[in-house]
Structures are given as C-alpha cells and as structure tokens.
Amino acid sequence: MTFKKWMSTGALMAALIAPNTLVSAEEEKTNDDFTERTYGFTAIDEELILASTLLRFDSGLTFTYPDAVRGVYVTGHSAGGARFNELLKLLDKTDLNAMVIDIKDDFGDLTYMPSDDSPLKPLNIGNPYIKNPREVLEILEEKKIYPIARVVVFKDSALAKAKPELSFVEGSEVWKNGRGESFVNPFMKEVWDYNVEVAVEAAKMGFQEIQFDYVRFPEGFENRADTLTYGKGEYESSDTDSVQKRVHAVTDFVAYAREKLKPYNVKVSVDIFGYAATLAEAPGIGQNFGKISENVDVISSMIYPSHWTSYFGIAKPDLQPYKLVQEYAKAENATLAKLESPPTSRPWLQDFTASYLGSGNYQKYGATEVQAQILALNEAGIKEYLLWNAGNRYSPGVDYTPLNK
C-alpha cells in the first residue's frame, strides 16, 4: 500500500470518529472540497459523524487518576526491557505514580509493531522494542500506575525521508538540523492525521493520556523560513504574517488532535519550551503558551535548570534549581491565571547532570537538586510534575512529596 493510500485510510478513520460540529454552509463546502482534494473521497455523512459521538471506546483497562501525577520518562527500550522491572520497583517504593512511555520516538519510529490491520503497518516504521504493549499496560493497571503515551509529532526523520513533500527541503535534500534530525511540516494536515492515528492506536492500547511532544517548528526556523522549500497548505491564503501562520498551525493541530481523540476518553497534554510561558509567544517555532494551554488538559513546560541562560536574573541556573523553578512558577501561574479554563500544570524537571555546560556552569544532580525543584513547584501550588532522564536512571533517595509529610 502506498503512503497516499494509507493516508486516505487514516483520514477516513479520523473522519468517522470526528465529533459533530456546527458549521455554515460555506464552511461546510470548503471543508468538503478540502477533504476530497486532499484525500480523494467526499466528506462523510453528518449523521454518521453525529452517531459516532455517541460511541466511546473502552480498552477494557481501568485506571484512576492519581491525587497528583508524579511521573518518570520511559523509553521504548526500557518499557520493553529489563529496566522496566527496575522502574516498577522505584514506583513501588516511592510516591511516584506515573510513566510517560515513548510510543512514537524522537526519530519518528514507533516503539511497537502495529497489527496487520493497522493503517500504520504499511509504513514499516514499527520496532519491537515493546513486544507486547497490552501486557505492559496490564501490569501498570495492576500496580495502579497512570500510563501516558508520548508521541513526538513534528520532529520526524522517518516520515521526512519517506515523504519529502511533507517536510522542509533545502536544495534537493530534506533539511536537517545540526544534530542530523529532520522535521515534518506543521502546515500540512496529512501530517496532523498521521500523528492523530498514532495517538488513536495508543488510546486503544489503554493509555489514559496522550502527550504530544515537539509540537512546533524547528528551532531557529525564523532564520530559514524564506530559504527552505515547503508547502503551507490552507495557510497559504491566510492574510496573517508568517509568524502568525506558524502560531496558528501549531495551535490548530493541538485543537484538532484533541477533538479527534474525544471518543477515546483520553486526556491530551503537550510539552512546551519553558521560556514560552514568559513571552507573548515564541514566534520562530510557533508556540504560544496561552493558546496551546486553552486546547489541552495538561501543559508540561520543560523547565530543566540547565536549559536556561541567565534568565530571571540568575547567572548560572543549573547551579540554582530551587530558585530557577521558583521564578518560573511565578511566571507560569500569572500566565495561566489569565485563562478562563486553565489546564493542569505538570512541568518536566531535571534529573540528569548537564556536564556539557562546562566547568563552573553545572553541578552533579542527585536527590538534593531534584527535591529542590519539586519543593519549589509545591510551594507555588503546582503539585504535578514529570522527571526527565534520557537513560531512565533516576536519583535514589528523593522525597517526591516534600509538603505532604
């Protein structure tokens, strides 16, 4: 099956589960025309769409949302390997209660093998890292560990290589950043539907939440926006400037994905750069903290102290994790307070040593540094958080609920 054929199947499935919305006759015709032009079939009958909203998928697994999510990042290799048992022991003996598990990773690869009847199967991007996702989820259900599926969206070297027209091209080659990574184009709805289909599969497995990561254009995109070759889809005709086109595309994807996932009773969360909460918007990458927050259940800012440079008046943030998180929390609380229905705040915290910063700019992170970040959040009224360590080795001896004792 060709990618084009697969995409038609995926889009059709997405249309079948789309919640009913009220649109004008002109908007309806525009939507129908876009659907037929892009996917090759006419829009589905409104009654079928309305009927589908009455159906809610049941994975057969039962999870209870924790008092507050306190989670760790888990790669596909860890979830499907020996380290999974080590992580289970960590959660058994501490107040940690959630796992964020890679389902689509930073390379664009799936960490499991899609079933033969999956529309994702023909892409050959599955990997047997997690040999039996259902078994993993059943173990998490038994141990009352809240499962979150991480889906990396627009950083996707696999899809960019397979379909350059859905990516950014430089000369005759797909553009890559300094780390050799490629991105796919947030303007293209084919890319949206593809990632929603991955999220739907994760929901069917039994994950209770879909966490979208890399929901943005490449870093520094504003410096190459006029030199790369790429399509702008329906945003081409927008009368907004290039900055707002990017902001709208990113925000629209989040809103679109949330709507498509409603029949699966999963929460939707988005990872976002921490500095985005301190700005009106991050125009180069298209992230607007407030607008994204209005369209998710959970917002997860990445506020690792090592990732800030002389911010909040702190010259060397990695050396002052408590102060950095304390100042960030003030800024985020002020931003979210302006929203009518703010999402749950669940920041990503640092549990790794950033030796790449060079001597004098970093420190070894362990229980003291991790706990300092948690305490700063808790004091600001932010009770949820996630810990990041790329190797999934977390510091022992941390008090994960310092204000609950």
Image (tube, rainbow, N blue to C red):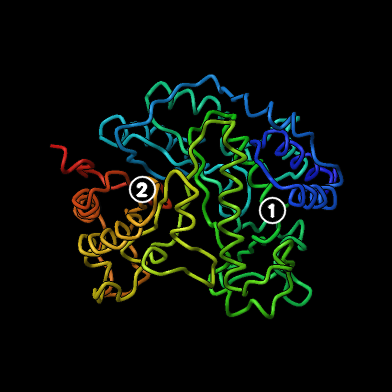
In the image, 154 versus 233, the foreground residue is: 233
Residue 152 lies left or right of residue 380; in this view the side is right
Residue 14's place in the image compared with 312, above or below, is: above
Residue receiving disc 2: 346
Residue receiving disc 1: 191
Residue 19 lies left or right of residue 331; in this view the side is right
Residue 235's place in the image compared with 195, above or below, is: below
Q: Secondary structure at mark 1?
A: helix
In the image, 75 versus 285, the foreground residue is: 285
Task: Report if the CB atoms under discs 1 and 2 are less than 8 Å apart.
Answer: no
- Disc 2 marks a residue whose amino acid type is Arg
Residue 287 lies left or right of residue 333; in this view the side is right
Assign the C terminus to one quadrant of the image.
top left
Residue 294 lies left or right of residue 240; in this view the side is left
The residues tagged by marks 1 and 2 sit, at their Cα atoms, a distance apart of: 26 Å
Residue at image position (74%, 40%) is 10
Residue 305 percent location from the top left of the image: 31, 64
Residue 262's place in the image compared with 335, above or below, is: above
Q: Secondary structure at mark 2?
A: loop
Q: Is residue 367 visible?
A: no
Residue 113 percent location from the top left of the image: 66, 36
